[in-house]
Image (cartoon, rainbow, N blue to C red):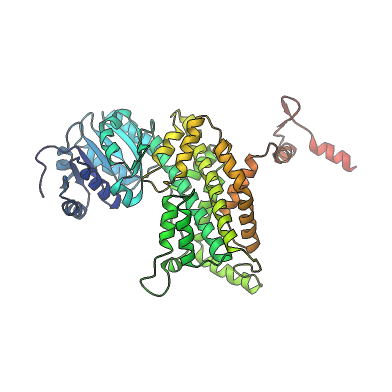
Amino acid sequence: MAAPTKPTRIGLAGLAVMGQNLALNIAEKGFPISVYNRSTSKVDETVERAKKEGDLPLYGFHDPESFVKSIQKPRVIIMLVKAGSPVDQTIKTLSAYLEKGDCIIDGGNEWYENTERREKAMAELGLLYLGMGVSGGEEGARNGPSMMPGGSFEAFKYIEDILLKVAAQVPDSGPCVTYIGKGGSGNFVKMVHNGIEYGDMQLIAEAYDVLKSVGKLSNEELHSVFAEWNKGELLSFLIEITADIFRIKDDKGEGYLVDKVLDKTGMKGTGKWTVQQAADLSVAAPTIASSLDARFLSGLKEERVEAAKVFKAGGFGDILTGQVVDKKQLIDDVRQALYASKICSYAQGMNLIRAKSIEKGWDLKLGELARIWKGGCIIRAVFLDWIKKAYDRNPDLANLLVDPEFAKEIIERQSAWRRVVCLAINSGISTPGMSSSLAYFDTYRRGRLPANLVQAQRDYFGAHTYERVDVEGSFHTEWFKIARQLKN
């Protein structure tokens, strides 16, 4: 294996799909890179790809010592290994050969507190540490991802020149990377990005279900509808790939592949973390939470098949018939419902990031996050430009829903949104994402809620006290005694 004639600019350890593609991207941008993987076949495979893809300046190493020593000082090494103990193991292996001032960057989907723990441990050894969220899947990693580095600012400055070139480039708004903030902020922001992604995917699946099950659209029609939607306000990576999916024929039989895919959704944990954090911070995130619940329920395939038999026997079919719909109107209504629901999902994600930023003192810039998500990442969408503009107009915006532009868009679409949710309910189709988004909007826009009754109940059975609308202070009433007297 050819060795570099002089030290390389950067190293990358962990050559699964994302690692290989990011390494090739870095090399293609003109930065000589050293690569290492515990199983050496991946190293050879990456070196082979680098040759094939343009004789790129990528150098493979089979042992950690020669890998580390091949990199120019101060050394910068990106790790792309599975979150948790494999990260600690890789750090242990590499740090044996690192020197003071060298830097390790974790590019995986790591829990933010693990990054903060590691940053402290590395600092004690005189090493710098960054936790960097990377989004865009294998295609993004190879051609330009969105990157979210957080942790040591000094470490960020070491590789800023590389990241600016390697990131997705968006005309008029620049490279999709920025220094996020201190500690585990980069990982936290990537985690919420993934939570928003869960919500987006669920909402799209619900749009598909209503159009297919109630509107009786064929896969060809669904392809046309989503391709058309991708020219308007829904223009995004996820809508684009959804349109593509409806076109692909089954290579193992008749019909379309999408109809043969088992209706069971996998997950790796970032959506669950997002919902847990929302609960810990008392931030309502019902769209993201309902998308997680939908994945849990999808996993109960065998139970659902049995349940369908039970209810069918009772005369209750899969879809409740009798709904006559105007196809053209339905398609337009679903488009509007999808867009309005999407605003709620992003509003929840942004509020969660803000709450954590306040708690941790990270001083995160929400408009800048929207900017770096405009390209490269899975949730990239034209819509993010409008989110950025909303935070540019008012950095202290309490909620995206009350930005004048977004408020206007929701008001224009709310009738269609309600029609779709009602139609779905009456047809026996669950739309948890759209329904919970609508409930979130309807709750947030009301000046008075029935929470007064809940607080009265809490005071009745647990003497939790309550506040009043007309007098300052905390009050407790002997509800039980008064109620008993009234009964006598």
- From the top left corner, tell me how far across and down residue 347 is, in percent: 53, 40
- From the top left corner, tell me how far across and down residue 252 is, in percent: 36, 73
- From the top left corner, tell me how far across and down residue 462 is, in percent: 71, 37
With 105 as the anchor, is 323 left or right in this view?
Answer: right
Give above or below for 95 relative to 307.
Answer: above
Give above or below for 399 relative to 46.
Answer: above
With 327 as the anchor, is 114 left or right in this view?
Answer: left
For the question of whether residue 296 can be seen, the reply is: no
Q: Residue at x 29, y 37 (%)?
A: 164
Foreground pick, 11 / 439: 439
Foreground pick, 218 / 133: 218
With 122 as the anchor, is 445 left or right in this view?
Answer: right
Q: Residue at x 10, y 47 (%)?
A: 2
Give above or below for 252 relative to 347.
Answer: below
Location of the C terminus by quadrant is top right
- From the top left corner, tell me how far across and down residue 165 is, in percent: 27, 39
Q: Residue at x 27, y 41 (%)?
A: 78
In terms of image quadrants, where is residue 324? bottom right
With 405 as the anchor, is 93 left or right in this view?
Answer: left
